[in-house]
Amino acid sequence: MDILVLNCGSSSLKFAVIDTGEGEVLLSGLAERLAGPEALVSWRRGDAEKERRAIAGGDHAAAMKVVVEVLREHGLQDELRGVGHRVVHGGERFKASVVIDESVVAEIEKCVPLAPLHNPANLVGIRAGRAMLGELTEVAVFDTAFHQAMPKHAYLYPVPYELYSEHGVRRYGFHGTSHRFVARRAAKILGKPLEETALITAHLGNGCSAAAVLGGRSIDTTMGLTPLEGLVMGTRSGDVDPALHGFLKDQLGWDVERTTKVLNKESGLLGISGKSNDMRTLEEAAAAGDERAVLAIEVFCYRLAKAIGALAVPLGRIDALVFTGGIGENSAPIRAKVLGHLGVLGFALDPERNDGLARGSQGPVTQDGSSTALVVPTNEEWMIALDTAELVEATS
Ligand code: AMP
C-alpha cells in the first residue's frame, strides 16, 4: 500500500511516499526555509536526479500544494491510500497511533505545553495535509506512544506528586517509532516472537536515547519529560545535576532560559569537544590527536554504557542490545568502546564482524556465545507508513 509520510518542523516539511510492502521509498523530499524568501521544495523520485521548485515566501500550506502537484506529476497521487503524520508528543492520551479527527487534533493541541516547539509545527502539517488531501485517511504516529507502556515506578519523578497529577510532570520518552521498529526487526533476526524478547535498543543519532523493550513493549527509557534527559547527545547534555540552573544563576547570573539553551544547544559532544556535534568529525579529530574530541567520545560512550547497564535491571535478561541511528549504525569505533565497558553483562566484541558490517546492513557485532549486540538500521518513515496502512485497512 502506498502511504504519504509527513514530518513537519517549524520551517520545514519532510515528505516521502512509501510502499509498505518492503518499505521502498517511491519519492522523497524536503520543503525548507518555509515562510522565508528562500523557501524551496526539493524531491527525488527513486534514484533519479534531485528536482527543485522555489516557492519564495511560501508557508507549509504552499509547500503541501507543491507536494500534491509533484505527486500528481509523478503519477503517485492516485495510488495513495493514506497519510501518516509524525507527531512528537502525545502525552498520556495517546498510547498508539490513531486516525486523525477533530478530537485528536484538539488532544494534540492540549499536548503543546509538553512540546512547545514541535507539536504546533506538527499541527500545521496536519492542517495543511487535511486541506489538500482531505479525502484520504490521516493518521498520527507519536514519538511518545511506544513508551506509554512504562510502569508508574519507571515514569514518576521523585517530586511532589501533584506536579504529576495536576501538571503532567513525568517521564514520557521519545524516539518511540525508532525503538519499536528496530525491536521488531531484532526479534526477526533472533528468530524469536517479539512477545518473547528482552531487548535494549540504543538510538544514537543527533538525539540519543535507549530503551528497555520487554515482549515488544517499552518498560523504561532514558529520555524524560523532554528529550533533554538521559544520554549525551550532539548538542544536548543529557543528565546533569538538577541544581545546575540555580548554581549558574548564583555564579554567573544566567537565567533559566539561558541555561536551558546552553543545555540543549551548546552541550553534549559539542560542549565537551568545543569543536563539533558531529560524531564523524570528532572521530577524525580524535584520530588526529585532539584531546577534547577524545574526551567527548569517552564521556559519550561511558555514560551510554552505564545507561545500558541500568536498563538491564527492569529486563532481567538481555536477548540483544540493538545499535541504531546514524552513530549506532555507522560507527564501529563507538560500538567497540561501548561494548568494551559492558563485559559485566557478558558482551564480547567480534572486531571482524563490527568493522566489516557494510553501511545500511544489519547483523551481530559480538562473538558467538557472548551476549548479543546487533546493528539494525532504523526506518521511522516505514514504521509510520505501516501504522497508517494498518489503520487505513481497519477503517475501510
Ligand atoms: P542521525 O541523527 O541518525 O542522522 O545521526 C547523525 C549522527 O550520526 C552524526 O553525529 C554523524 O556524525 C553520525 N554518523 C553518521 N555516519 C557516521 C560514521 N560513519 N561514523 C561515525 N558517525 C557517523
Image (cartoon, grey):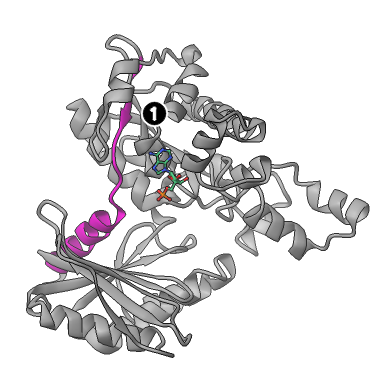
Q: Which residue is mark 1?
A: 332
**Up-down relation of residue 390 to residue 102 (above or below):** above
Q: Was residue 38 drawn as part of the magenta stretch in this picture? A: no
> At 12% from the left edge and 66% from the top edge, which residue is drawn?
2
Asked whether, in this view, residue 278 is left or right of residue 216, the answer is right
Residue 174 at x, y percent in the picture: 47, 52
Residue 160 in view (yes/no) = yes
For this rendering, which residue is in front, 357 or 179?
357
**Up-down relation of residue 14 to residue 365 (above or below):** below
Report the magenta residues as a range.
Answer: 371-393
> At 47% from the left edge and 13% from the top edge, which residue is drawn?
343
**Up-down relation of residue 391 to residue 351 (above or below):** below
> At 63% from the left edge and 55% from the top edge, which residue is drawn?
264
Under mark 1, the amino acid is Ala
Question: Residue 359 sits in which quadrant?
Answer: top left
| Image quadrant occupied by the C terminus | bottom left
- Main SS, magenta region, reads helix
Is label 1's Cβ within 8 Å of ligand 1? yes
Residue 103 in view (yes/no) = no
| Image quadrant occupied by the N terminus | bottom left
Q: Secondary structure at mark 1?
A: helix
Residue 332 at x, y percent in the picture: 39, 28
Q: Was residue 380 drawn as part of the magenta stretch in this picture? A: yes
For this rendering, which residue is in front, 334 or 289?
289
Residue 385 at x, y percent in the picture: 22, 61
> At 53% from the left edge and 41% from the top edge, which residue is drawn?
222
